[in-house]
Image: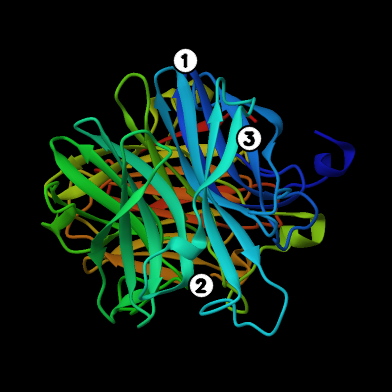
Amino acid sequence: MNQHHSKDQWRLTYHIMPEKGWLNDPNGAIQFNGLYHIYYQYVPETPLGGATHWGHMTSKDLVHFNQEPIFMSPDQPFDSHGVYSGGGFVKDGLIHFFYTGNVKLDGDYDYIYSGRKQHVVHVVSDDGFNILKREVVIDHDTFPEGFTDHIRDPKIIEHDGVFYMILGARKADNLGAVITYRSTDLSEWTYVGNLIEGTKDEGYMWECPDLFELNGRYVLIFSPQGIREEAYQFNNPHVAGYIIGCMDWDEVKFIPETEFIELDRGFDFYAPHTFEDETGRRIMWSWMGVGDIMPEYTNPTIARGWQHALAMPRLLTIKNDRLIQQPLTAYEGLRKEEQPLNINERYTLEDKAFELLFELPTEDEFSIDLIEDTTLEYKNGILTLEHGPSGCGRRWRSTKVDHIETIHIYVDTSSIEVFVNDGEVALASRVYPKDNMPHAHVKASDQAKVTLWGLKPSI
């Protein structure tokens, strides 16, 4: 850690964050020859964003990470305004990355209906570090009619020896959609139609689509912009969620079997991105942030030259028509000595990064005061995460939960992630306490049990 960062109490200790500048969407996550790679949208020059590169980190356990050199930069004519998001795909000993090359033309354009080109670019690597080939495989001008200039974020799925590429899109009538291309060689691609389309209440643009098979069913994750807000869901400027369903591969259509379900009910979660590791686990990365948050809330680290982070990677499974999201058990390796906490007693904590497990055998109401001025309260079937001034404009998010048996909380120096009922509900938020001594105070019935661990740094 450099001298400047050593004085920054908000630098995270076990989350991926930029050394300087801006970070957003996770990209290209893979495991290759035992080594995990995670790439991400990165602008080293400024914490306010701009023409993105692909930053790169590697890990052997998804807990401890090594910072690698920037993998790709916007230095080609087909990506001069950003190496935008995309996915990674391993085939026959090579890694195939696909991303959106963003180009903004000079002139009087709105960059929605005109003036923007978003090419699909194919990159081949033999190790995740070296680039053997980098070329446009779908030129923007060949996209189908009926869409705006916003078609991006390619992700690959293979079925019966055929490769399918899905892309998020904004239709000309301002409805979201996921479109599909097909290939037999990962180089020549043919448009086959729309995988699924949205309604006027489901947003105007669907970003970062991700289709995969899990527990014998298909899951479609995407991030709709402009979805209609409701009292207990879709409260952020942009949201991310999923639909569980099945695939009609003859027609290449996704058939929903559930409604669209929001993945995370906190303030800071967007652009989730999954991969299957070499043990068969489906793991999800996400940006612990969201665009267009100002003026409602902000991140004071901008003044310190950096902004945003990735959330902890989450293990995905399906239970009762819902995605279950759980922190990886490997993070237990960061635990310090176990400390039981008494109910209704306030504790000043020695560690700014800690893990707290709250077990509630009855369906009683409760509240948990944490960090500096953050409260997690359950009352009348509503769970509410509320911040005071340390939220920097983040006030509260509430969600319906029929009953609560466990609350699993991970706190870092400027973040909190909450997992309810072993991952049935999740909430992620940035928070910026000024007090260097966090506290914990659980108010609940005497039957409840609270366990706390300080956490060692891993970044």
- Measuring from the top left, give residue 251's x and y in whole percent: 13, 54
Q: Residue at x 19, y 32 (%)?
A: 160
Helix, strand or loop status at disc 2:
loop
Q: Residue at x 63, y 25 (%)?
A: 129
Q: Is residue 449 visible?
A: no
The earlier-in-sequence mark between 1 and 3 is: 1
Left or right of 453? Residue 91 is: left
Residue 240 x, y percent position in the rendering: 38, 60
At which x and y percent is residue 285? Answer: 45, 42
* Disc 3 packing (10 Å; few <14; some 14–19; many ≥20): many
Look at 57% across and 65% down and name the residue there: 117
Residues tagged 1 and 3 counted as in contact (Cβ below 8 A):
no
Q: Which residue is mark 2?
A: 395
CA distance separating discs 1 and 3: 16 Å
**At 60% from the left edge and 38% from the top edge, which residue is drawn?**
134
Where, by quadrant of the figure, is residue 325 drawn?
Answer: top left
Q: Nearer the viewer, mark 3 or mark 2?
A: 3
Query: Looking at the picture, does residue 239 appear above or below residue 162?
Result: below
Marks 3 & 2, CB-CB < 8 Å contact: no
Give the labeled residue for mark 3: 56
Q: Label 1 sits on what residue type?
A: Gly
- Left or right of 377? Residue 41 is right
Secondary structure, mark 1, is loop
Give the CA separation, mark 2 to mark 1: 42 Å
Quadrant of the rendered structure where residue 301 is? bottom right
Height in image: 395 above or below 29?
below
Q: Observer-nearest residue: 83 or 433?
A: 83
> Disc 1 marks which residue?
34
In the picture provided, is 335 more to the left or to the right than 146? right
